[in-house]
Image (cartoon, helix red, strand yellow):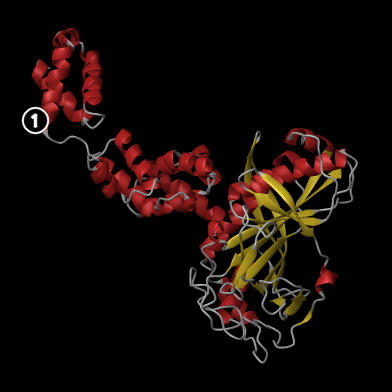
């Protein structure tokens, strides 16, 4: 495809001429102890190629055996997404060559997924207030993950320009659930927000089910965003592109927005969209071409001959239905009532992807207002600067709760607490360690604080006279002077008391 040399249109200009159609494909690594078809460990972070066996390496004579827990998790995900659960389904071989696929095929499901024809609702904020959209679920099917390639010698970490590549097959064979939506057509201006809201809702659901931690920064949940454009008023879908492995909620929204603008520029230039995979670059906020996208027939699917069909009994499905957790929307409503948040406050928490973090912080001992303040304030600003999600910002709910406890104990005030959070986010240790290393505790020695009060009174005799004359509003000026001289570490309440004692108030 010839390069587009003109500047990209604004998002508003793009959607004025074209309607986007989206399709989201989300891969979730299941939190099973062993792999999908063998007994190898799924523990993250093992030395390369130490968690492998003849089966997940595809060696001759090895035979796969289905992981029952993975099937159970797949059924529960399907039920939570209001899907129909197949009475019988089977695995298929998806044939293609990638060096990180040791068998040279992937065991997946093709025409007979375990769950299909479902839906979930998502809510986004609009100028007219919150709007709810129903996202259709085409299918949720089981498959195994690939290994991992590490490209060495280049500047980008990608194969282009690398001198050599290394392969780690530890991840090969880890159970995956791929959840595929039906085409999503919404108000064009809301398309990126709806995409983000869907992945956010799905992540909440997966975590609530307990089938995966769904940590996007670790690759436990990966989103492929399919986007196409059609001229206003047209009914036929345009040619789609698939932006692969988008790994944060913020990036989902940004990648969809960029691809809408890019495709509009291509079409405006009179050039056809190429059906291809694309790579998302977090640093530049752009996508670049990957490979021409295969069609289903290119994979030469055929039934996996070494595995019998999976036929979950209706009794088992009904039993699993009873284990489903509280739906995320109902949970949010309950938590909002428990926390005493207004609708606007709760929307801010939801939009920040902080519901679980605030909940865990409160469970660790914080009050609701304090938990919200830190996650949506200092921590959110740092996460945005680093281009990461809140859950990867570098601080835990327990640490946030400890900061809030230190305020409650009188060890810190808000100003000092912000410095403590800053230190924790910078990797300086726990809140108590940062307090000790930076010397941030409030001044508790009455002698030292009294000396600072005396100095302030001596330096501002006119203010002291006003206070002696009954003008209590002038106390603030002396407290400010005390705070300045102590580097903000004076206890303002105790400083006020000492001032009043000395000035006879």
User: For the C terminus, which image quadrant?
Assistant: top left
Q: Is residue 291 above or below residue 418?
A: below
Report the side of 49 relative to 59 (left or right): left
Q: Position of residue 241 (x, y in %)?
A: 78, 53
Q: How many marks?
A: 1
Q: Which residue is mark 1?
A: 447
* Residue 189 figure quarter: top right
Report the side of 250 relative to 192 (left or right): left
Residue found farthest to the bottom: 61
Q: Position of residue 247 (x, y in %)?
A: 60, 55
Q: Is residue 261 above or below residue 174?
A: above
**Residue 325 in view, yes or no:** no
Q: Position of residue 156 (x, y in %)?
A: 63, 53
Report the side of 431 relative to 371 (left or right): left
Residue drawn at (54%, 72%) of the image: 322
Q: Residues within 10 Å of mark 1 (few under 14, many from 20)?
A: few
* Residue 203 figure quarter: bottom right
**Of residues 1 and 408, which is closer to you in this image?**
1
Residue drawn at (74%, 87%) of the image: 305
* Residue 29 figure quarter: bottom right
Q: Position of residue 111 (x, y in %)?
A: 79, 74
**Of residues 422 and 159, which is closer to you in this image?**
159
Residue drawn at (65%, 80%) of the image: 314
Instruction: Indicate the secondary structure of the residue bearing disc 1.
Output: helix
**Residue 335 in view, yes or no:** yes
């Amino acid at each position: 495809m010839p390069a587009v040399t003109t500047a990209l249109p604004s998002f508003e200009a793009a959607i004025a001429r074209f309607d986007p159609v989206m399709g989201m494909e989300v891969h979730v690594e299941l939190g099973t102890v062993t792999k999908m078809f063998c007994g190898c460990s799924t523990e993250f972070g093992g030395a390369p190629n130490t968690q492998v066996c003849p089966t997940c390496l595809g060696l001759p004579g090895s035979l796969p055996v289905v992981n029952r827990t993975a099937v159970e998790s797949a059924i529960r995900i399907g039920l939570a997404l209001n899907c129909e659960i197949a009475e019988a389904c089977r695995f298929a071989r998806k044939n293609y060559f990638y060096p990180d696929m040791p068998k040279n095929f992937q065991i997946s499901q093709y025409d007979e997924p375990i769950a299909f024809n479902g839906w979930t609702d998502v809510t986004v904020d609009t100028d007219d207030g919150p709007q709810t959209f129903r996202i259709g679920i085409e299918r949720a099917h089981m498959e195994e993950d690939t290994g991992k390639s590490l490209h060495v010698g280049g500047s980008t970490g990608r194969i282009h320009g690398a001198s050599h590549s290394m392969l780690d097959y530890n991840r090969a064979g880890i159970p995956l659930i791929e959840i595929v939506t039906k085409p999503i057509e919404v108000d064009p201006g809301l398309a990126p927000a709806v995409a983000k809201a869907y992945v956010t809702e799905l992540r909440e659901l997966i975590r609530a089910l307990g089938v995966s931690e769904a940590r996007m920064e670790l690759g436990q949940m990966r989103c492929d965003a399919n986007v196409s454009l059609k001229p206003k008023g047209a009914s036929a879908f345009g040619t789609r592109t698939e932006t692969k492995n988008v790994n944060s909620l913020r990036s989902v929204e940004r990648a969809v927005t960029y691809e809408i603008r890019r495709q509009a520029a291509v079409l405006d230039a009179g050039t056809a969209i190429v059906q291809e995979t694309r790579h998302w670059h977090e640093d530049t906020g752009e996508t670049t071409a990957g490979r021409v996208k295969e069609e289903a027939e290119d994979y030469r699917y055929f039934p996996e001959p070494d595995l019998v069909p999976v036929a979950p009994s209706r009794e088992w499905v009904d039993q699993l239905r009873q284990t489903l957790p509280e739906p995320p929307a109902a949970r949010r409503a309950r938590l909002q009532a428990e926390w005493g948040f207004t609708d606007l406050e709760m929307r801010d928490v939801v939009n920040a992807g902080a519901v679980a973090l605030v909940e865990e912080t409160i469970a660790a001992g914080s009050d609701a207002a304090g938990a919200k303040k830190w996650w949506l304030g200092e921590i959110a600003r740092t996460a945005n600067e680093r281009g990461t999600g809140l859950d990867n910002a570098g601080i835990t709910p327990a640490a946030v709760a400890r900061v809030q406890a230190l305020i409650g104990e009188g060890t810190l005030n808000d100003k000092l607490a912000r410095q403590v959070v800053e230190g924790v986010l910078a990797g300086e240790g726990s809140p108590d360690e940062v307090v000790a290393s930076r010397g941030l505790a409030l001044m508790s020695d009455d002698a030292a604080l009294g000396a600072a009060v005396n100095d302030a009174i001596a330096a501002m005799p006119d203010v002291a006279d006003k206070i002696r004359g009954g003008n209590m509003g002038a106390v603030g000026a002396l407290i400010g002077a005390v705070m300045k001289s102590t580097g903000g570490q004076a206890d303002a309440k105790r400083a006020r008391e000492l001032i009043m004692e000395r000035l006879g108030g």
